[in-house]
Image (cartoon, rainbow, N blue to C red):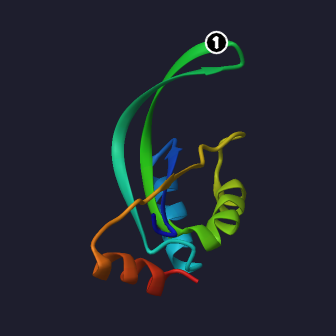
């Protein structure tokens, strides 16, 4: 297992996704953020089943900055309860994992 992480979060618009992605990289909380446009989400909110078109953020980071990244998502996001799910990167290409480490502080 490594100390590298992938964090998932959804946004309501491409504009918001780009703004959040850019800010996370500028703050060195993420090495890279992929924006997957036009995903369809089905979820429960306030006891109702809802459907929305969203953008998925795939955020590459490290365990050491996860708490700060989570706080930044809360600050930057328009949702009342922004998604923030951390996944462990078990293994990967050593040069790529080193690049993540060098990009995040």
The residue at the point 41 percent across, 59 percent down is 90
Q: Nearer the viewer, residue 48 or 89?
A: 89
Q: In the image, 32: left or right of 64?
A: left
Q: Is residue 13 above or below residue 100?
A: above
Q: In the image, 103: left or right of 77?
A: left
Q: In the image, 29: left or right of 5?
A: right
Residue 14's spot in the image, x, y percent?
42, 50
Q: Is residue 44 above or below residue 40?
A: above
Give the structural element (helix, strand or loop) at label 1. strand
Q: Quadrant of residue 83?
A: top right
Q: Quadrant of residue 28?
A: bottom right
Instruction: Check the picture and name the quadrant holding the N terminus.
Output: bottom left
The residue at the point 49 percent across, 62 percent down is 5
Q: Nearer the viewer, residue 95 or 11?
A: 95
Report which residue position mark 1 lands on: 48
Residue 58's spot in the image, x, y percent?
42, 55
């Amino acid at each position: 297992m490594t100390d590298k992480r992938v964090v998932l979060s959804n946004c309501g618009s491409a504009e918001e996704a780009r703004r959040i992605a850019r800010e996370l990289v500028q703050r060195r909380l993420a090495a890279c953020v992929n924006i997957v446009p036009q995903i369809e989400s089905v979820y429960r909110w306030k006891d109702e089943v809802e459907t929305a078109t969203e953008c998925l953020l795939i955020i590459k980071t490290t365990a050491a900055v996860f708490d700060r990244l989570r706080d930044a998502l809360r600050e930057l996001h328009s949702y009342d309860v922004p998604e923030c799910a951390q996944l462990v990167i078990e293994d990967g290409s050593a040069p790529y994992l080193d690049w993540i480490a060098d990009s995040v502080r």
